[in-house]
Image (cartoon, rainbow, N blue to C red):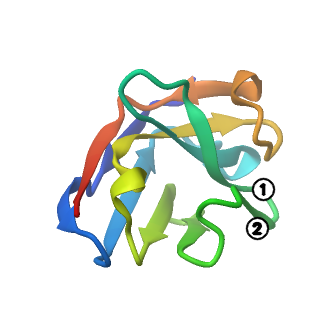
Amino acid sequence: QVQLVESGGGLVQAGGSLRLSCAASGRTFSTYAMGWFRQAPGREREFVAAISRGGSTYYADSVKGRFTISRDNAKNTVSLQMSSLKAEDTAVYYCAAGFIATMDVTKYIYWGQGTQVTVSS
């Protein structure tokens, strides 16, 4: 069992930056791939970024070059550094844990409660 708690969301102007963090419970964090997803009102949850157990990273085309995912296995955390934010990045952001780093939302086993990111234009 893994519990995930996101933090770092908030209101930011377009062009600004935010850093989201996800703290994981348990001693097996390093054995999981981690992902970030987001969901805007009226839309399906969509892939943002993922990082494998070995540190390989994957990004949605819409955030490539603007967002950076990283993990710290010693601290049981995964982070999402977001820069050059746009109004269309507004959503609830969720972190998730699974056995493979994938953009497939169904492959993730554990989910956090989400943190709101609002980008004003």
Looking at the rendered image, the quarter that the C terminus falls into is: bottom left
Outermost front residue: 121
Q: Nearer the viewer, residue 48 or 3?
A: 48
Does 110 appear above or below 56?
above
The amino acid type of the residue labelled 1 equals: Ser
Q: Secondary structure at mark 1?
A: loop
The image quarter in which residue 44 lies: top right
Q: Nearer the viewer, residue 110 or 1?
A: 110
The amino acid type of the residue labelled 2 equals: Gly
Side of 30 where 86 appears, left or right: left
Side of 114 where 50 appears, left or right: right
Q: Secondary structure at mark 2?
A: loop
* Residue at image mark 1: 52
At label 1, counting other C-alpha atoms closer than 10 Å, the crowd grade (few under 14, some 14-19, many 20 or more) is many
Looking at the image, do the residues carrying marks 2 and 1 touch, with CB atoms under 8 Å apart? yes
Question: Residue at point 31% right, 69% down?
Answer: 18
At label 2, counting other C-alpha atoms closer than 10 Å, the crowd grade (few under 14, some 14-19, many 20 or more) is some
Question: Residue at point 48% right, 57% down?
Answer: 77
Q: Which mark is residue 28?
A: none
Q: Position of residue 1 (x, y in %)?
A: 57, 23
* Residue at image mark 2: 55
Q: Position of residue 67 (x, y in %)?
A: 54, 70
Question: Residue at point 30% right, 41% down?
Answer: 115
The image quarter in which residue 54 lies: bottom right
Does 108 appear above or below 11?
above
Side of 83 where 2 appears, left or right: right
